[in-house]
Image: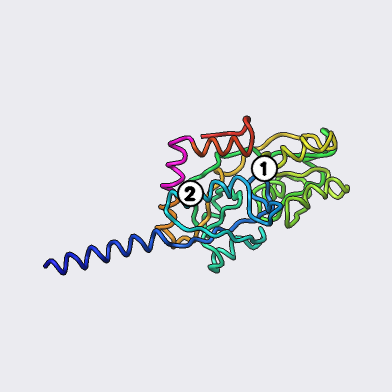
Amino acid sequence: MKKLLLATTVMALTSGAALAQQTVRMGTEGAYPPFNFINDSGEVDGFEREMGDELCKRAELTCEWVVTDWDSIIPNLQSGNYDTIIAGMSITDERDEVIDFTQNYIPPATSAYAALSADADVVGGVVAAQVGTIQAGHVAESGATLLEFATPDETVAAVRNGEADAVFADKDYLVPVVAESGGEFSWAGEEVQLGGGVGMGLRESDTELKEKFNVAIQSMKDDGTLNEMITKWFGAEALVF
């Protein structure tokens, strides 16, 4: 009986250690500041890097960061090239049909138009948006002509070079674009509320991993750490929990 109890205890400890040592590959775009970007040292940086590392610490997971293109970010998750998507991805019903999401770690945020002129035609003109985003879907239904690009930088460049009348994206992404443009860019049209906030995407079968991250996200909400990080990376005007 003692041997059986000892064996059971050893198995439980071994299982716990295995979970604690689990390596989770965090898939991100690395091209959407301040959510995520590649710094001068060639490493993933930004709000999601800092938050993701803290989540892994709290969940007792070893995490590795994998950079991938946005337009293949969901197929690469499904193919097993990484275990999570942590890339400024808004939670939508359409995406939730093919992958699963944690609770949100960014509240439902505002999307906005930026243009070279405040009176740019964002309803009947040409509007640039990143492919596969909720912003692209909104433009397609708005009556404007949608011009899609693989990266957010290309959407801004399209306005700058005259291909598009405006760019439509997360306001958090566009704030530094407008602020640092020296007056070149201004806000246009009306702001729009889209999606259910930003969450981590996972394969629908990874229920245990989802729960680990949900617990960690909630703990960061409860102790105020998450709000501090949001304010640090997005500014004092950013929406918090």
Q: Residue 215 in magenta?
A: yes
In the picture as drawn, the residue positioned furthest to the left comes out as 1
Q: What residue is at 49 percent from the left and 38 percent from the top?
A: 225
Reading the image, the residue beneath label 2 is 55
| In front of the other: 82 or 112 | 82
In the picture as drawn, the residue positioned furthest to the top comes out as 237
Which quadrant holds residue 4? bottom left
| Residue type, numbered disc 1 | Asp
Q: Residue 77 in magenta?
A: no
Frontmost of labels 1 and 2 is 2
State the CA–CA distance, disc 1 to disc 2.
23 Å
- State the quadrant of the N terminus: bottom left
Q: Main secondary structure of the magenta part?
A: helix
Q: What residue is at 48 percent from the left and 49 percent from the top?
A: 55
Image x and y of residue 108, in percent:
57, 39
Reading the image, the residue beneath label 1 is 170
| Residue type, numbered disc 2 | Leu
Q: Earlier in the sequence, mark 1 or mark 2?
A: 2
Image x and y of residue 78, in percent:
54, 65
- What is the number of the mark on residue 160? none
| In front of the other: 40 or 133 | 40
| In front of the other: 129 or 137 | 129
Q: What span is in magenta?
A: 214-224
Image x and y of residue 51, in percent:
54, 46
> What is the secondary structure assignment of the residue under circle 1?
strand
Q: What residue is at 55 percent from the left and 41 percent from the top?
A: 106
Marks 1 and 2 in Cβ contact (< 8 Å) = no
Q: What residue is at 72 percent from the left and 47 percent from the top?
A: 139
